[in-house]
Image (cartoon, rainbow, N blue to C red):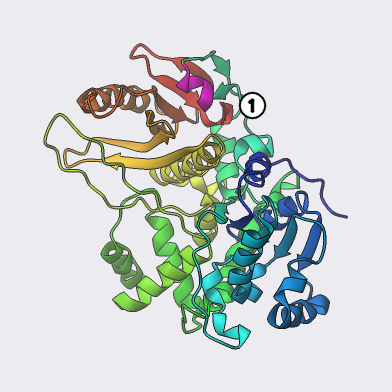
Amino acid sequence: MEKEYIERLFDKELDFYLKIVGAIQIVGPKWCGKSRTAKRHAKTIVDLMKKKTRDQYVNLAKKAPEVLLNSGDKPILIDEWQIISFIWNSIKEAVDENGGFGQYILTGSVTDNTTSNSLAGEENEKHTGTGRIIKKMMRPLSLFESGDSSGDVSISNLRKGIFNAAICQKTISDYSYLVCRGGWPLAIDNDKEVSLQQAKTFFNGLVEEDLFSLKDVPLRKDKQRAKKLLRAYARNISTAASNESIKADIKENGDEIDKDTFVKYLLALQRLYVIEELEAWNPNLRSKTAIREKNTRHFVDPSIATSALSITPESMFSDMRTFGLFFESLVVRDLRIYCDTIGAEVYHYRDKLKREADTVIVFNDGSWALVEVKLGDEEEIKEASTKLVELANDIDDKEHPKPAFLMVVTGTNVALRDDNGVYVVPLGCLKP
């Protein structure tokens, strides 16, 4: 029996963009719910997942794309559209000719580069589709969507200076489970062991098949090497570890990988929307301090990392530093989902003096907020609060306005505003 649909923050995004562009390409990892969400917004469905109808649709796309693109009421969903990615130019032309909004929804778990345009029988230059087709990323569920956050504290409200203290019912043990469970729709409201298995199954499919399925990123099938690389990446989660550091980790664990092959693996993981690194924010500082611009390493969901390292909710407590890094990645996942909803971007900040903010929220009007992540230690939370104030004071307010707010996201139980004016907010209280 099909599980009941879980309302997504992405539903509102999709409704909005269907009113302003001709076509939307929804990208994201497998199993995050792209197809099911898209089907709720489509009036006609071209389902390329089903083998019995796939060949029929592929042939029609090759011989008469205009027929396929007018095969029913709009919006038309083309599910797993990368199978017929050669139809891109035809979609762009159909949007131009029809001149309407909300005509097509395209979904897929890999980029459209994975299928050659030559499937159409010729090498066609692919038009960008700018202004006609937009790409929107969908991630696994946030804690607010899965019902694991009360939503008592809103990022949008904090931006306006609106805040009410709140109590969070989540414990640190709850967070160890939520990190390992992840936000996979099939894992929600299931028995614990069934829920935890979803991330493991995703990981197994990744190292056994998915990583080696991309036509434009050819990798020799080597399950053990793929596991070692993903374990090394997972051990460096929420850090700015260099490629060389991760390669050295792989070598220490019994394998050696050359630079080109390593880069191919990372590219394949990006194409599959498995890793999603956090870029650096570069503000103007009053002091002449060099900015560190390395990306922070993250998976699209931290449960992929715990699956790679065979970490359970119980074993998480054997290394609290690592637990803290996994918790930070969980926070980054949720902040990205929430900020997508409110038109904001998420970055990280670190300078040569080792001053840092785990995340920086930049809103669409140029306002911004600094956010640190601390699992639960009271002294660390106080120290993070003080450092956020110091960093905010060093940012040139002629180039950037004062921050909309400063926040430490925690695994504690009380949402409050501390003596520094910094919001201390449990992750289980947050919402957009």
Hey, what amino acid is under mark 1? Ser
User: Which is more toward the observer, 317 or 179?
Assistant: 179
Q: Single out the residue that lies furthest toward the left.
A: 288
How many numbered marks are there?
Answer: 1
The secondary structure that most of the magenta stretch takes on is helix
Would residue 182 be counted in the magenta stretch?
Answer: no
- For the point 41% across and 30% down, which residue is it? 365
**Helix, strand, or loop for circle 1?**
loop
Check disc 1: other Cα within 10 Å, few if <14, some if 14-19, many if 20+. some
Residue 394: % across, % down: 20, 26
The magenta segment is 155-160
| Rendering quarter of residue 232 | bottom left
Residue 157: % across, % down: 52, 20
Residue at numbered disc 1: 150
Q: Is residue 181 above or below residue 71?
A: above
User: Which is more toward the observer, 49 or 174?
Assistant: 49
- For the point 50% across and 31% down, which residue is it? 411
Q: Is residue 250 above or below residue 30?
A: below
Residue 147 placement, left or right of 316: right
Q: Quadrant of the N terminus?
A: bottom right
Q: Is residue 270 above or below residue 280?
A: below
Would residue 159 be counted in the magenta stretch?
Answer: yes
- For the point 66% across and 43% down, which residue is it? 19
| Rendering quarter of residue 396 | top left
Q: Is residue 315 above or below residue 111?
A: above
Residue 339: % across, % down: 51, 37
Residue 271: % across, % down: 50, 66
For the question of whether residue 127 can be seen, the reply is yes
For the question of whether residue 255 can be seen, the reply is no
